[in-house]
Image (cartoon, rainbow, N blue to C red):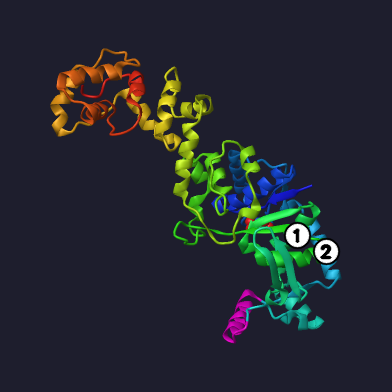
Amino acid sequence: MTVTRFAPSPTGYLHIGNLRTALFNWLIAKQQGGTFILRLDDTDPERSKPEYADAIQQDLEWLGLTWDRIETQSSRLDRYADAADRMRADGRLYEAFETPTELDLKRKKQLNMGRPPVYDRGALALSDAEKAALRAERGGHWRFKLDHERIEWTDGILGDISIDAASVSDPVLIRGDGQVLYTIASVVDDTDMGITDVVRGSDHVTNTATQIQIMAALGHSHPRFAHHSLLTGPQGEALSKRLGTLSLRDLRAAGIEPMALLSHLARLGSSDPVELRTTHQELIDGFDLSRFGSAPTKFDVDDLRPLTARVLHARPYADVAEALAARGIDGPKAEPFWLMARENVQVIADVDPLWDIVQNGATPLIAEEDADFIADALAHLPPQPWGETSWSDWANTMKERSGRKGKALFMPLRKALSGMERGPDMARLMPLLSKAPKGS
Ligand code: GLU
């Protein structure tokens, strides 16, 4: 059975890049009738915060990306300690003592000599006495001893990958203060939990190589891996600095609709066009990981607005009643108001100025050359309450009185009554207006 996981660290809010990973793993699990696990990578006690763990769950719930199970790494530390003990016993985990400054110096020297900055395994040459002295002085961290051979896998997006393990530093699995690091925790979880498919960002390719060897050292085969390309800004610029402003909470606050966001991300970077989907099932049915390419993928937050608009244009009143009521839009007018307004909004917040006009009347927009015409028009508004034919009645009256027609007739009337150059169908807006334009 297919088992996937989404494994964010609760050290911040989810952003658009995280969502790509979450969505792909969720879609794969759903497509196969499998299990989707939300795993909180919270082994860093200083940076992991319960409020971020809560926020991650709220954001995924908002998008309807529900999980079958939630796991936290902080509750599984004994499993990681077991695995570390086994690898120590097998000689695959060794203690090293270099400080970050010493490591930095080594790297610089290697680079100066034109060599790749790979850890030189200096710690393996230490005698027991030297180790004991260093341990007493500064404590040691633990590295996994890679087998220097090629590590190969067929990646679900990148195709055949082959990495020379000698070009990679032996990864640190346990820090000097005893903190277990992601690399080992993730391997133990992925094998314990029977994960069959891992999709993550291409910044994890080297991790994958080392994790494949760690899994083998623990007696396990590895899951299928796929690495999606990283998102860039619209000009190809790195998104990493801007990801803070592309949090899912900000997008939600800006009125972006879940299905717009999901539809966009389920296709962006693939050879299939972005299509607005109305249900999660359609997303699942239309997803194909093999259609995604390895090139960096441009993401423009502005692309979400027209998609959101299309979601709203099709949305029945019942689905927005609550959101409208939260904005003070309720009562008998709320439904006809929505049916009139929905074609004219990009995000739900755009209803506010329209509702203001409906309730309080517009501030007329009158061009100088239309001043007399509008003064006459306002004096000949049909009697209230206005109904379905009020707009055409008024326009006909003014056509006869002024001889105007077409745009010269309708545009000034629209601007006077709605205060806007373009916007809702006037025949549908007029019956909703409680008041004549301000100052008329
Ligand atoms: N916590 C890791 C991250 O957010 C998980 C990576 C993985 O999927 O293994 O980068």
Q: Where is residue 409 in the image (x, y as percent from the top left)?
A: 21, 27
Would you say the residues marked 2 and 1 are in contact, meaning their CB atoms lie under 8 Å apart? yes
User: Which span is picked out in magenta?
Assistant: 99-115
Q: Quadrant of the C terminus?
A: top left
Residue 191 in which image quadrant: bottom right
In this rendering, would 114 be left or right of 80? left
Residue at 29% x, 32% y is: 420
Question: What's the residue type where badge 2 is placed?
Answer: Leu
Residue at 81% x, 65% y is: 216
Total numbered badges shown on the rendered structure: 2
What residue did someone put label 1 on?
A: 187
What residue did someone put label 2 on?
A: 218
Q: Does the magenta stretch include residue 341?
A: no
- Does mark 1 have its CB less than 8 Å from ligand 1? no
- Which quadrant does ligand 1 occupy? bottom right
The kind of secondary structure element at disc 2 is loop
Q: In this view, does 142 lie above or below 75?
A: below
In this rendering, would 228 be left or right of 402? right
Residue 95 in which image quadrant: bottom right
